[in-house]
Image (cartoon, rainbow, N blue to C red):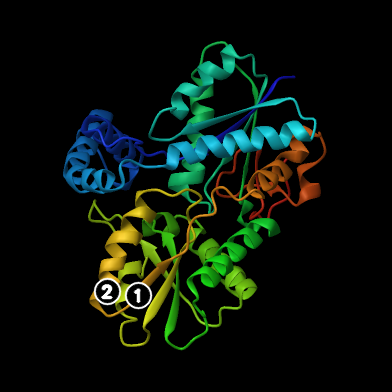
Amino acid sequence: MATAIVLLNFGEPADPDRDTVLEYLTRIFYDNADLEDAESEEAAWERSRELAQRRLPGLMEEYEEIGGSPLQAQAAAQAEALTATLDDRGHDVSVYHAMQFMEPLIDDIPETLAADGMDEVIAVPIYPLCGPSTTVSSIDSLEDAIDETGDYDPEFAAVTGWHRVPIYNRIRAESIQSFLDEEGVDVNDPDTAFVFSAHGTPTKYLAEGSRYDQYVEEHAEAVAGMVGIDDYEIGYQNHANRGIEWTEPETEEVVEGLGDEAERVVVEPMSFMHEQSETLVELDVDLAEDAAEVGLELHRVPIPHDDSRFPTLLADVLEPFLSEFAPSYYQLRQCQCRNEEGTYCFNAELPPQEV
C-alpha cells in the first residue's frame, strides 16, 4: 500500500504581490463565511471579496515590510525533515505539504495524490493548538477535496491534538529558556513580565463547543511550569473584521496594561509553528511599538520551526498508522472537535472508533 502523509498549513504569500494577496484574503474570508448569514454562495463570495479589499492595504504593508512570508519555505523544510526521519525508520512513505489558502492548495493536492498512486492518506495539521477554523477546517477541506476527485477513494485518517505530546512541550519550553539566556533576561525578575500570545478565534466557535481556549490555558500552564515562570499573562491576537466578538483579552491590551508594572515584557507566540506576518509584523513591529509607548522593552521568543526534534515528534505521532498498531496504544482517541471516523486526537476523552 502506498501511503501519503499530508502536512496541512494555513499558508501565506511568499511574495508581496497585490493580486496574490487579494486572492489569498478572499479565500480566507470565504472559508469563514459561516460566521455571517449569507443569502447564497454568490453572496458569500461577494462579501468575502468586500472584506478582502478592506483588509488588503494593511496586509500589503505588512508583507512589503518583511519581503513576503517565510511560512511556505519553513513548511516545505518541515516536510523534507519528516521525510528523512521516516526514511531513517524504514517507512516507505511520501510526504506532501498543502495549504488552506495558498499554493500548493489543499483543494488541488488530491489530484497529485491520485496520480502518484497513493492508496492511504494521513493528514497532520501543523497547528499546535486545535481550532475549528484551522485544524478542523483543514482536515475537512482535504477529505472533501478527495471525495470530489473522481475515481479516487483512498483510506483516510487524520491526527490532531499533538500539543499534549511531551516532547512538544519540551521543545517550546527549551526554546523559551534558550532565548531568555541569550537575551540575559530573568523571567522572574519583578521588572520582567511574561505573555503567552495565542491566535484569537471568534467566540461563536467556543459557544458551539470548541475547546481552543482550554488548550491555550493548559499549554501555557504546562510550559510555564517547565520553564519556572511564576507569573504570566495570556493574550489573543485577534482579527476582528465582521463585527463579531473574538477571544479576550487582546495581546495589545495585555502588554499596554503592563507599563506600570514592569520594564520589559517577554512574548511567546504559542499558537504558531512557523514565522509569519503575525509574528514578524504584529509582534515584532506593531506590538513592539505598543510596548515602547508604555515604556516597555519587548523580547519576542522565536518560533522553533526548525527544531530537530519536531520531525521526530511528527514521526512518533504517525507511528501507529505506519506500523499498523492500535492508535489507542499511544493514547490517541476519536476526535471530538471533528467527530468523523478515522480522525484521532490526543485531547479527546472518548474511546477510539474501530476503523
Which label was assigned to residue 292? 2
Does 202 appear above or below 81? below
How many numbered badges does the structure rendering display? 2
Residue 125 percent location from the top left of the image = 55, 42
Q: Secondary structure at mark 2?
A: helix
Residue 329 percent location from the top left of the image = 81, 48
Viewer-proximal residue among 194 and 203? 194
Question: How many neighbours does mark 2 have within 10 angstroms: few (below 14), some (14-19), or many (20 or more)?
Answer: some
Viewer can see residue 354? no
Q: Is 36 left or right of 211, judged from the image as shown?
A: left
Instruction: Look at the image and tell me in which quarter the C terminus lies.
Output: top right
Question: How many neighbours does mark 1 have within 10 angstroms: few (below 14), some (14-19), or many (20 or more)?
Answer: some
Residue 311 percent location from the top left of the image = 65, 43
C-alpha span from label 1 to label 2: 6 Å
Give the residue drawn at x 21%, y 35%: 49
Q: Quadrant of residue 3?
A: top right
Instruction: Look at the image and tell me in which quarter the N terminus lies.
Output: top right
Residue identified by numbered label 1: 297
Q: Is 190 left or right of 247, judged from the image as shown?
A: right
* Sequence-earlier tag: 1 or 2: 2
Viewer-proximal residue among 299 and 182? 182
Does 256 appear above or below 219? below
Give the residue drawn at x 53%, y 21%: 110
Q: Are marks 1 and 2 in contact (CB under 8 Å)?
A: yes
Viewer-proximal residue among 225 and 53? 225
**Hey, what amino acid is under mark 1?**
Glu
Which label was assigned to residue 286? none
Q: Is 320 left or right of 292, judged from the image as shown?
A: right
